[in-house]
Amino acid sequence: MTMTTSLDLLHKVKSMSDAQAWGAFLLKYEPFIESCLTRYGLDGHAAADVRQDVMCVLLRELPRFEHSGNAGAFRTWLRKITANRLATFLRRQTRLRGPQVIHLESAVEQLVRDDSELAQRWDREHDCFLIGRLLERIAPDFAPQTIAAFEKQVFGELSADEVAELLCMPKASVITAKSRVLRRLKQHATELEERI
């Protein structure tokens, strides 16, 4: 399941006239960007600084962003902005030395290349992050075992057989759980897009 940023949400944020849309955008993307930056090796304060720089660039540049219509166009643009702001941060740092700098510089180089492992990981993490946010909203509508079966198949990448054994459920119930949760996620995503 690939999650994309709603074109309607992007249009509203680009116009800068809808404070609710900008708030929804920040809630969606600030935690994602900061969590990626900490996984690349920045400490919490540095990750927050770079994340804030990314948001400032988005505020300034988003009105000029032209979506190509291809799925993931915004996500790719955001990844490249994040890489650029991380590179700028690294150039300004004097306290970072040795392996940490080399690791972060490598992350920047990989993030700007669409075919790199890190760029592909960014896309997967983006999808998982957005699915997780939606899942938090719909989880109360399902039994905990149904959500667990879905999460283990989607996030844990376990087969239906493995999940059935792990959760002591019939395989058919595991498959049905995944299908029901996916259907509800898609429905909820559509409803959110219509409200924002």
Image (tube, grey):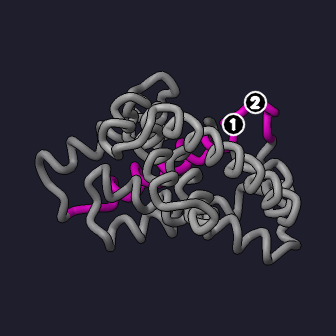
**Main SS of residues in magenta:** helix
- The one nearer the camera, 94 or 133, is 133
Residue 10 spot, x, y in % from top left = 79, 54
Give SS at disc 2: loop
Three-letter amino acid code at the position of disc 2: Asn
Amino acid found under the numbered disc labelled 1: Ala
Q: Quadrant of residue 72?
A: top right
Q: Is residue 29 visible?
A: no
Quadrant, the N terminus: top right
Mark 1 to mark 2 CA distance (whole Å): 6 Å
Residue 57 is inside the magenta segment: no
**Which range is magenta?**
67-94
Q: Residues within 10 Å of mark 1 (few under 14, many from 20)?
A: some
Does residue 187 appear in this view?
yes
Judging depth in this view, the residue of 62 and 133 nearest the camera is: 133
* Residue at x 30%, y 42% (from the top left corner): 166
Q: Which mark is residue 20?
A: none
